[in-house]
Amino acid sequence: MNKEMAETLIRTGPGTAMGNLMRRYWVPVVQSSEIEQPDGAQVRVQIMGEKLLAFRDSEGRVGLIDEFCSHRGVSLFYGRNEDCGIRCSYHGLKFDINGRCVDVPSAPQMASKMGIKAYPCIERGGVVWAYMGPPGKKPAPPEVEWSLLPDSHRFVSRRLQECNYLQAMEGGIDTAHVSYVHRYEVDIDPMHKGCKALDYIKADGNVIFNIEKTDFGLTLFGRRNGDPGQYYWRITQYLFPWFTLIPPFGDHAMGGHVWVPVDDHNCWAWSINFHPKKPLSETERAHMAAGKGIHVEYEDVPGSFRPKANRDNDYLVDRVAQREKRAYSGIFGFSVQDASLQESMGPIQNHEAERLLPTDKGIAMARRMLHEAALDLAHGVEPPALDAGKQRVRAASVLLDHAVEPVAWAREHLADGLTHPVYSI
Ligand code: FES
Ligand SMILES: [Fe+2]
């Protein structure tokens, strides 16, 4: 990728082309449960270079405001969340969920001039979403399947990944890597083991990709050898600009991610598991909470979203496990496996030096879409994929006869597919 394109894609701070584009979509900020109680503890969260503070006010409304007080810049993380607003602990200025300054104890007449930045929020799918774009351009709320299900059907976690969002998200688009770095873990992980899909994934690491550009982003068709006369297809979707879905494994809960820039060197990796048709079992929930499947165990620091296995400890690499073929790279946990490799590229991968292969077709197309949309927006063209109704798609893992044309099959069974059965082996 050339320098201009890479720079456009990776920079998401205020005023950048990609930052402007991403701010046109609802962005997941925190889990509703992180700020569950009215007047409970406020939390800091950084999104696309902006340091923000999320809180729930006395009436249960969620606010996302600038982290810092307009008076002399103190962090409102140390303020008091009470009586419908956050009061700065230094000189008592108080701000409501709209960022309005509602009290300046020492100079009440100044209140109207002391407001701070605030972004509108909604709650959906157990997640607080914010709209950080220009007023009047707010799209309809997201309709990705997991966000529409009852809480009982879904488990959500988020973790900090210490690299640019692009190289992290590209791991979510590139399903070819499953045959390598996740190869052994799939046999022991409670959310992956024991399904037919694994036989095909392991037997054929040479995935052939076919990609279809759609109203919501991309549908990616990964073809492996199946049984005689059949291909094994892993079909998944990239929902512009930052959602990826994971092709399912047997009857296990389905999965997906959202990749949100924290700043240019870090991102939030959201991981979601869900059953479209039934609640998650207590056992599944316990495994997810323990960091199995696509979730992680966190380091032992209050409020930290950094995984316990991180680059400071070489992700707890175990060379014996690697030799004994229990962990392909010697690292355990799907998300840590991915994060370790993606962070090893450096905080911002040197995209000019990379040399893409045929299995990178999906990545190349996603990049082109992002790049084109960012430049178009700068020239006044409205962004793509703003129609939330088009996000009602589902991934699949299927054996199809050689004669079946997968794009046509997917249009019939997966597009607007939330009423269809889950197709998974
Ligand atoms: S810095 Fe916040 S009230 Fe003075
Ligand atoms: Fe992965």
Image (cartoon, rainbow, N blue to C red):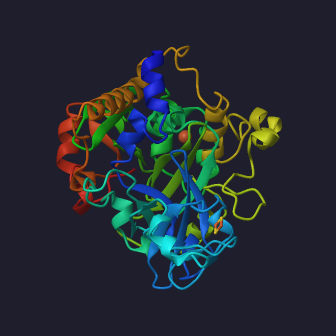
Residue 154 visible, this orientation: no
Residue plotted at (36% across, 37% down): 232
Which percent across, then down, holds residue 406? 24, 36
255 is higher (above) or lower (below) than 325: below
Q: How many marks?
A: 0
Which percent across, then down, holds residue 114? 50, 65
Which percent across, then down, holds residue 347? 63, 32
Location of residue 8 (image quadrant): top left
Q: Nearer the viewer, residue 49 or 368?
A: 49
Q: Nearer the viewer, residue 114 or 29?
A: 114
Residue plotted at (81% across, 42% down): 313
207 is higher (above) or lower (below) than 76: above
**Which of the four quarters of the rendered structure image does ligand 2 lie in?**
top right
Q: Nearer the viewer, residue 261 or 138?
A: 138
Residue plotted at (69% across, 63% down): 303
Say left or right for 302 vs 58: right
Say left or right for 148 vs 352: left
Picture quarter with the N terminus = top left
Say left or right for 110 vs 413: right
Say left or right for 310 vs 286: right
Residue plotted at (56% across, 14% down): 353
Q: Nearer the viewer, residue 6 or 393?
A: 6
Location of residue 73 (image quadrant): bottom right
58 is higher (above) or lower (below) than 368: below
Which percent across, then down, holds residue 59? 45, 85
